[in-house]
Image (cartoon, grey):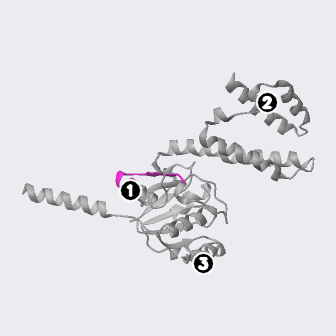
């Protein structure tokens, strides 16, 4: 009897280990959806369908990667995994319309809790830490993917699935993921805004933004070998207050003046 019990447990274990995510459907058709479709197809993941309420957007992805597409939620086909790539505000509503219970549903947001998903299906998160722009080629195997699931088995499934795409996969809960999303905003979105302000400042003296690109490239290249703290240069790092004051007086926009002072003060404080 004991032998039979052990064999039964072994069979159940092997069956569980054999379970994999074989079919995927993408809900949404924005930049994230476009790149995930490319990553899935590139890594031989079977994408069954792309859904979007605007048919032309779903059609663009569908025709590009030879995936069936629809703008009718009632036409969703059964899949192992549904990936919601909509805006954060639309995740809850989108999840409420998924007509299947025996499936795994994830969203791709960095700042939204997994509990936002509404339904009797199994729930999780598949968050790619990258900035996505259409028609920009990316090395998907270098993009970090953070996964979360309600139970250990689905966590394993998501980790194995993400590892088909990326070499950098890590389990992370919703609170930790929110911190990483905040970090990403600092190093990506805010930095890009600084590029914009710099572009506008150079334009006032008719200097093209291209002249700043070697500086930007070296700034980014340095942090491959150095920590951001070690790589910091500039008048605030040197505490060159005469230059800081001159810059402050040159800035005409009061909001940009405030921004310049806040950032400079933060750098000065960091190196005192």
Task: Say which of marks 3 and 2 sits in front.
Answer: 2
Which comes before the other along the chain, label 3 or label 1?
3
CA separation, marks 1 and 2? 51 Å
Q: Position of residue 70 (x, y in %)?
A: 57, 76
Q: Using the numbered discs, state the Cα–Cα distance from disc 3 to disc 1 in whole angstroms.
A: 31 Å
Judged from this view, the residue extending furthest toward the top is 272
Residue to which mark 1 is pinned: 154
Instruction: Residue 34: say if magenta.
Output: no
Q: Work out whether mark 3 precedes mark 2 in sequence or the reverse, and give the earlier one.
A: 3
Which secondary structure, mark 2? Answer: helix
Query: Local crowd at mark 1 within 10 Å, few (<14), some, or many (≥20)?
Result: many
Q: In this view, does 233 lie to the left or right of 252?
A: left
* Residue under label 3: 63
- Residue at the location (81% across, 25% down)? 240
Q: Where residue 125 sits in the image (x, y, percent)?
A: 49, 54
Residue 149 within the segment the image draws in magenta: yes
Which of the pair 1/205 is nearer the observer? 205
Q: Which residue is drawn at 60% across and 72% down?
A: 61
Rendered view: 198 above or below 166: above
Q: Can you tell which mark lies on residue 235?
A: 2
Distance of mark 3 from mark 2, alpha carbons? 52 Å
* Residue 175 appears left or right of 9: right
Q: Give the range drawn in magenta.
A: 143-157
Q: In this view, does 61 lie above or below 114?
A: below
């Amino acid at each position: 009897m004991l032998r039979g019990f052990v064999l039964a447990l072994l069979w159940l274990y092997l069956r569980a280990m054999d379970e994999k995510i074989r079919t995927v459907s993408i809900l949404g058709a924005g930049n994230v959806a476009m790149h995930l479709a490319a990553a899935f197809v590139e890594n031989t993941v079977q994408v069954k369908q792309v859904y979007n309420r605007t048919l032309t957007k779903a059609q663009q992805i569908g025709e590009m990667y030879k995936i069936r597409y629809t703008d009718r939620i009632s036409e969703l086909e059964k899949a192992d995994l549904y990936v919601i790539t909509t805006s954060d505000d639309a995740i809850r509503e989108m999840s409420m319309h998924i007509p299947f219970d025996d499936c795994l549903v994830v969203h791709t947001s960095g700042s939204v809790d997994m509990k936002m998903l509404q339904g009797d299906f199994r729930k999780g998160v598949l968050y790619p830490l990258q900035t996505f722009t259409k028609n920009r080629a990316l090395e998907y195997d270098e993009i970090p993917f953070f996964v979360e699931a309600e139970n250990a088995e689905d966590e394993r499934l998501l980790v194995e699935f993400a590892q088909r795409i990326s070499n950098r996969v890590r389990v992370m809960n919703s609170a930790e993921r929110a911190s990483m999303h905040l970090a990403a905003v600092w190093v990506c979105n805010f930095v890009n805004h600084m590029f914009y302000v710099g572009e506008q400042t150079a334009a006032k003296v008719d200097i093209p933004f291209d002249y700043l690109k070697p500086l930007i490239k070296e700034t980014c290249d340095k942090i491959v070998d150095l920590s951001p703290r070690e790589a910091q240069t500039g008048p605030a790092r040197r505490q060159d207050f005469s230059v800081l004051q001159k810059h402050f007086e040159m800035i005409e926009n009061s909001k940009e003046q405030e921004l310049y002072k806040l950032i400079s003060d933060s750098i000065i404080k960091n190196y005192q």
